[in-house]
Amino acid sequence: MTRLFFNGVTVGRDLFTDLVYADDTAFFVDSPTSATTCLSSFADTASVLGLQISWPKTKTQNLGSGLQPDTIFVNGNRVDPVSDFTYLGSSQSFDDQCRPDIRRLYRARFRSNVFPGQHLEG
């Protein structure tokens, strides 16, 4: 099997090309062409293991640099772009802002005792 490497994101000295949690996966690629190649390879590998990609749930997003990507097609499946989505309970926005999460946590403070004794500014 050919192993493909993509640019990824560097944090300190560590390079991350993807995030995987249970049945959620996020890939870090630098172009729509790389996204198509990466998703196609992922789908091929998954099928060898008897798994299938849920193409209606699969989306692309540009995080913090440039315009939103166009719709791409992977193995004949349409993959639409989104401007924001929730990944593992955290709001991801194309403009790289975390304000929605801050507001959500602020509102949660008043609905529960999540941060007892703490004062949060909104």
Image (tube, helix red, strand yellow):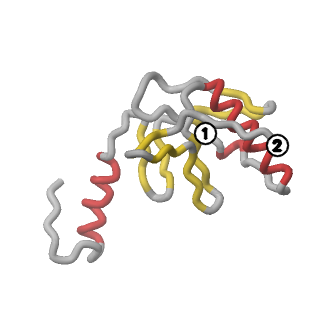
Circle 2 — which element? Answer: loop
Q: Residue at x 46, y 47 (%)?
A: 14
Q: Residue at x 52, y 45 (%)?
A: 16
Q: How many marks?
A: 2
Residue 93 position within the rendered picture, expressed as x and y whole percent measured from the top left? 41, 40
State which mark lies toward you, 2 or 1: 2
Position of the N terminus, as image quadrant, is top right
Left/right of residue 2 with respect to residue 91 in the rendered view = right
Residue 108 position within the rendered picture, expressed as x and y whole percent measured from the top left? 30, 65
Neighbourhood count class around disc 1 (C-alpha, 10 Å): few under 14, some 14–19, many 20 upward: some
Q: Which residue is mark 2?
A: 1
Residue 10 position within the rendered picture, expressed as x and y whole percent measured from the top left? 44, 41
Left/right of residue 103 with respect to residue 82 in the rendered view = left
Cβ atoms at labels 2 and 1 below 8 Å apart: no
Residue 85 to residue 73: above or below? below
Three-letter amino acid code of the residue under disc 2? Met
Mark carried by residue 59? 1
Residue 9 to residue 87: above or below? above
Left/right of residue 12 with respect to residue 56 in the rendered view = left
Circle 1 — which element? Answer: strand
Left/right of residue 109 with respect to residue 86 in the rendered view = left
Q: Residue at x 32, y 46 (%)?
A: 98
Image quarter for residue 2? top right
Residue 119 to residue 5: above or below? below
> Extreme front residue here?
13
Give the CA separation, mark 2 to mark 1: 26 Å
